[in-house]
């Protein structure tokens, strides 16, 4: 087992109460999602994403001088407010919830403030203002999960729920994906993260090209 996967299991067990809090909050607030179906509407999907972000975070954190407790707590809590009525502000709302939860459960103030900052700047308009390596790792780890097989599967499930044909799905991806992929590149912080995301973007572009060729 790789070092970061060993850390993944160790810290997931250590902070299982935080993970359970995150799941319960997502389940409680999922009804805020618009009526239109998307895999993101499922709290279980958000938790799967959260676990992948935690794995990616530890992969990026290995051999760096960072606070692993902050890295882990930030990853587990980063999307706790995903179903905020104002989803574009979910990072700021998540930071508020994380601060309240961690403070109430006796975490050191220094740890709390580092986690709050990482969660607050992991997405949205504050994505270009990370002050710590822990915050930069969370951003990169979150983006890495957006260019892998799960991301493509998620989008295809969404298009399928809208009764699109494969041709319509690839047309939709061609309109939507270039903007997303440019944003992903712009917000990367670490050299390792940039390399992984570049490979992921190439994977998505290749998939789209192959799918398009089969449609014509």
Image (cartoon, grey):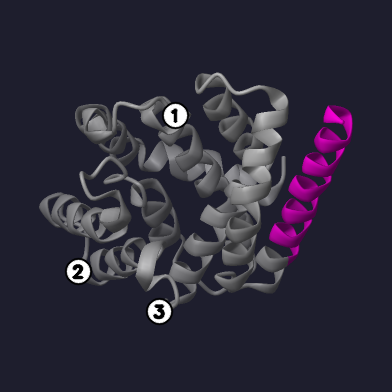
Query: Which x, y percent locates residue 89?
Result: 27, 57
Which badge, 3 or 1, is on the more N-terminal residue?
A: 1
Query: Which x, y percent locates residue 3?
Result: 67, 50
The residue that mark 1 highlights is 38
Spatial CA span between label 3 and label 1: 30 Å
The quarter of the picture where the C terminus appears is top right
- What kind of element bears circle 3? loop
Say few, some or many: other residues with alpha carbon within 10 Å of mark 3 (under 14 / 14 to 19 / 20 or more).
some
Which badge, 1 or 2, is on the more N-terminal residue?
A: 1
Say few, some or many: other residues with alpha carbon within 10 Å of mark 2 (under 14 / 14 to 19 / 20 or more).
few
* Residue at x 20%, y 44% (from the top left corner): 85
55 or 194: which is nearer to us? Answer: 194
* Residue at x 44%, y 29% (from the top left corner): 38
Spatial CA span between label 1 and label 2: 37 Å
1 or 59: which is nearer to us? Answer: 59
**In this rendering, the label closer to the viewer, 2 or 3:** 3
146 displayed left or right of 123? right
Residues rendered magenta in the picture? 195-216
The quarter of the picture where the N terminus appears is top right
187 or 52: which is nearer to us? Answer: 187
Say few, some or many: other residues with alpha carbon within 10 Å of mark 1 (under 14 / 14 to 19 / 20 or more).
some
Asked whether the residues under the numbered discs 1 and 2 touch, taking CB atoms below 8 Å apart as contact, a structural biologist would say: no
44 or 166: which is nearer to us? Answer: 166
Kindly give the residue lying farthest to the left in the view shown: 104
The residue that mark 3 highlights is 129
Q: Is residue 200 magenta?
A: yes
60 displayed left or right of 93? right
Which badge, 2 or 3, is on the more N-terminal residue?
A: 2
The residue that mark 2 highlights is 109
Asked whether the residues under the numbered discs 2 and 3 touch, taking CB atoms below 8 Å apart as contact, a structural biologist would say: no
């Amino acid at each position: 087992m790789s070092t970061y996967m060993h850390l993944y299991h160790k810290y997931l067990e250590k902070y299982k109460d935080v993970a359970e809090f995150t799941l319960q909050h997502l389940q409680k607030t999922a009804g805020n999602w618009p009526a239109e179906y998307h895999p993101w509407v499922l709290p279980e999907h958000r938790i799967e994403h959260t676990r992948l972000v935690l794995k990616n975070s530890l992969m990026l954190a290995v051999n760096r001088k960072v606070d692993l407790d902050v890295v882990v707590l930030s990853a587990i809590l980063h999307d706790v407010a995903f179903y905020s009525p104002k989803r574009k502000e979910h990072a700021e709302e998540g930071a508020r919830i994380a601060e309240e939860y961690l403070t109430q459960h006796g975490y050191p103030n220094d740890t709390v403030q580092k986690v709050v900052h990482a969660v607050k700047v992991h997405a949205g308009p504050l994505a270009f203002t990370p002050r710590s390596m822990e915050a930069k790792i969370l951003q990169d780890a979150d983006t890495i999960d957006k260019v892998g097989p799960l991301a493509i599967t998620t989008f295809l499930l969404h298009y399928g729920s809208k009764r699109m044909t494969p041709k319509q799905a690839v047309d939709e991806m061609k309109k939507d994906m270039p903007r997303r992929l440019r944003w992903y590149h712009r917000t990367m912080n670490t050299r390792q993260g940039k390399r992984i995301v570049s490979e992921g973007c190439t994977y998505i572009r290749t998939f789209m090209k192959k799918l398009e060729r089969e449609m014509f």
